[in-house]
Image (tube, grey):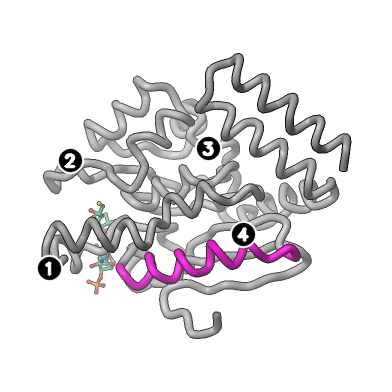
């Protein structure tokens, strides 16, 4: 996994660090990044030594400024675009990870950046964060899962406000909307995220995984089915 161009992957003390690494383009999400994320997400999911995953952006200015506009509408045809999207379903792969994923968000978090953040379980932002979904202005909709993941995190009204108006949201408002769990000064961002990771790593990996599954899978079920899921996971854990 050392030949990545657009991301950096590091593993240290049970934490897998994934850094979006195109600072010259504000870490814009391009096809290469999609393919590399697809690969690294399987690696962190399947590596038993990785207990927690941290997502962050390289450089001072952005976590991710959204889809790479230089590649915008460059797919040979909508059919091929759909097929590749199916084969490299980064968003589905995010959802297949039962380990906690924490996002360290700074600067611009736009478009796909919001959608990557929304696939994480805990979001910590620095005071200079700015969220936005410019898709409407480009004549497209948020379609990397965001129309489904964002309203599962914040309220329907707040999600529609962000997704339809394209209005940018700064740190204070993001915290009020519960789009982020916590806001810290820029220099404290990584330490704050690592502190959360360390706390989680002190617990049983299986218990942490089941706790995540109970919540994330349960949210898509009726209360009755969700309670069944919870009981099953709890029994499995007791039996292990
Ligand atoms: N795709 C490709 N390149 C991007 C990019 C993107 N989404 N966002 C920024 N960049 C590049 C710029 O082209 C520029 O490259 P250059 O130095 O070679 O000219 C560099 O990153 C710095 O961006 P710049 O626009 O000069 O910074 P700024 O401070 O003036 O503006 C933004 C910052 C985020 C407001 C602006 O870059 C922007 O609007 N980006 C596009 C956001 C967007 O629409 N994303 C798609 C969402 S679907």
Q: Which residues are magenta?
A: 31-49
- For the N terminus, the image quarter is bottom right
Viewer-nearest of discs 2 and 1: 1
Q: Position of residue 137 (x, y in %)?
A: 14, 44
Query: Does 60 appear in magenta?
Result: no
Residue underneath mark 3: 180
Q: Residue at x 62, y 31 (%)?
A: 215
Q: Is residue 99 left or right of residue 90?
A: right
Label 3 lies in ligand 1 vicinity (Cβ under 8 Å): no
- In percent of width and height, residue 95 lies at 51, 47
Secondary structure beneath label 3: loop
| Mark 2 burial class by Cα count in 10 Å: few <14, some 14-19, many 20+ | few
Q: Which mark is first along the chain, 2 or 4?
A: 4
Q: CA distance from mark 4 to mark 2?
A: 33 Å
> In this view of the protein, which residue sits in the foreground, 78 or 120?
78
Rendered image quadrant of residue 141: top left
Q: Which residue is mark 1?
A: 76
Q: Counting residues from the N terminus, which is met first, the one under dot 2 or under dot 3?
A: 2
Label placed on residue 136: 2
Q: Which residue has dot 4 on it?
A: 45
Quarter of the figure with the C terminus: top right
């Amino acid at each position: 996994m050392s030949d990545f161009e657009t991301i950096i992957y590091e593993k240290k003390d049970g934490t897998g660090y994934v850094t979006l690494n195109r600072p010259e383009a504000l870490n814009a999400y391009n096809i290469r990044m999609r393919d590399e994320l697809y690969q690294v997400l399987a690696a962190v999911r399947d590596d038993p030594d990785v207990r927690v995953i941290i997502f962050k952006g390289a450089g001072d200015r952005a976590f991710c400024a959204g889809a790479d506009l230089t590649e915008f509408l460059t797919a040979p045809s909508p059919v091929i675009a759909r097929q590749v999207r199916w084969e490299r379903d980064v968003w589905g792969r995010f959802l297949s990870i039962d380990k906690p994923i924490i996002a360290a968000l700074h600067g611009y978090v736009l478009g796909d950046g919001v959608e990557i953040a929304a696939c994480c379980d805990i979001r910590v932002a620095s005071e200079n964060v700015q969220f936005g979904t410019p898709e409407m202005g480009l004549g497209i909709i948020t379609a990397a899962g965001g129309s489904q993941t964002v309203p599962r995190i914040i309220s329907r009204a707040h999600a529609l406000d962000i997704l339809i108006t394209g209005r940018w949201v700064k740190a204070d408002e993001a915290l009020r909307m519960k789009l982020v769990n916590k806001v810290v000064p820029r220099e404290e961002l990584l330490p704050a995220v690592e502190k959360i990771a360390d706390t989680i790593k002190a617990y049983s990996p299986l218990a942490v995984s089941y706790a995540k599954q109970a919540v994330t899978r349960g949210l898509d079920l009726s209360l009755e089915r969700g309670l069944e899921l919870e009981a099953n996971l709890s029994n499995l854990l007791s039996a292990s």
